[in-house]
Amino acid sequence: MRQSHQVAALSLLSLALLAGCNSDDNTQTPEPVTGRWLKGDLHVHTAVSQDARETQADILKWGFEDFGLDYMSLTNHMRNNSQDNDDNDLGGILFYDALTRYEKPGLASLMPNYPGKLVYSGFEWDMPTHEHFNIAILADEQQTLDAIKTFEYSFSAKNEPEDFTAEDLAAWEAAGVKRQNQTHADAVAALAWLQQHFPKQSYGMLNHPRRYLDSYTIAEVRELHDAAPEVFFLVEGMVGGQFSGNRGDYGDSSSGVYGGVDPVVAEVGGWWDALLGEGRRIWNMGNSDIHFKTRPPYASSYYPGEYAKNYTWVEGEGTKALLEGLRSGNSFAVFGDLIDGLDFQMNSGEQTITMGQTLSAKAGDKVTINIRFRSPELNNKESDIGNEHYAGINPGVHHIDLIA
């Protein structure tokens, strides 16, 4: 499809098909809707990260008030140079200490201002010999905190044993906990640890995967996924840092981005296509990776929800329901609010499926694909940088590429 009127015609046709319309029978009752689309960002930094500048209060305001997100994951760097919520240099403290002393108490104080919104703390891990990897553990609070502390000791190379208390060190030694934070095998061991202890209560996301040409080989990505197929099911193909001159900070040491999208996802027949073709359930996401927007002479990331966002179908309330929504694959990611609604369904015979599900068909079966989307009139493009007048004209959808 190359023309907008053809896309609109498909939308109307799909609407009729998906609603079950029939010229001879208009008495069908639609099935009740049990879930809803939630908008969110899974890669958000506050000033707790030493290389980020924005306060926790401002991040929540931008994401929830200004740009209408429903959920955010704070994913500050797991390093021993953490700060407080307000960009005060504390001389360097462990991520766990910043999390428990500042990040979580700050959220407890601020989130009553945002009823119905969802925020939780994950972390961005410097994966040994590779690139950044986001992890969220969504178990009971004390269980989650204990797991984060143990993970930081065992698998983060950004600390030393003397950074931890003698009591913790003695407990880990008694339990046989080892430090594994130097090699690819250690990275695999870390994901295997999550798979063993939190297979249904955690997720991992490959962040800006080919920002550097030597970040991974596809064989290494396969090994990481083999170690934790229930945990590692997200890839940040639509990378953050889009306000940077090199979108996503993809400079000379990378193969660049295609329309802002990492080659892992953007290349037809590339890594993501190969992984999906092997039956691996790994879903694409788009995030802000906000550190700051402008700090002259530098520019980095749009605010949460300003340019990138994920739409996730969620049934139920809270982080566990969101986790199941993310795991299902029924999500889509958007840059620039090009669309704000998508219904993608396939059917064959009596089977009808949506994103993330599997259709069983044999040679000769007729398979029908219905794509229905909505494109808003406006987006969040500022009329002038920094004036906070967010009312840009949406360019609209030019065409759809359906890749099989």
Image (spheres, helix red, strand yellow):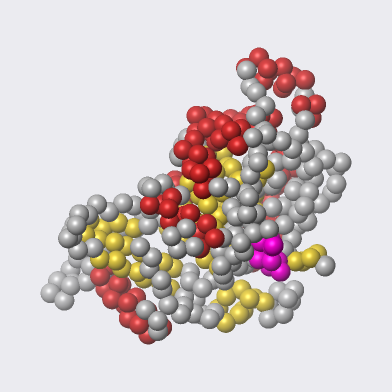
Q: Residue lying at the far top in this picture: please name it.
A: 174
For this rendering, which residue is in front, 160 or 324? 160
The residue under the point 56% across, 35% down is 188
Image quarter (top left, top right, bottom left or bottom right) of the C terminus: bottom left
Q: Is residue 201 above or below residue 197?
A: below
> Residue 335, position in %: x, y?
55, 68
Relative to 75, 89 lies left or right: right
Q: Is residue 139 above or below residue 308?
A: above
For this rendering, which residue is in front, 245 or 15? 245
- Indicate whether residue 117 is drawn in magenta: no
Relative to 11, 162 lies left or right: right
Relative to 179, 371 lies left or right: left
The residue under the point 75% across, 47% down is 48
> Residue 379, position in %: x, y?
57, 75
Q: Is residue 156 visible?
A: yes
- The image quarter in which residue 364 lies: bottom left
> Residue 303, position in %: x, y?
67, 63
Q: Is residue 105 visible?
A: no
- Magenta residues (range): 243-252
Q: Is residue 176 above or below residue 234?
A: above
Image quarter (top left, top right, bottom left or bottom right) of the N terminus: bottom left
The residue under the point 72% across, 57% down is 291
**What is the count of numbered marks?**
0
Give the prevailing secondary structure in the magenta stretch: loop
> Residue 73, position in %: x, y?
60, 50
The residue under the point 32% across, 62% down is 345
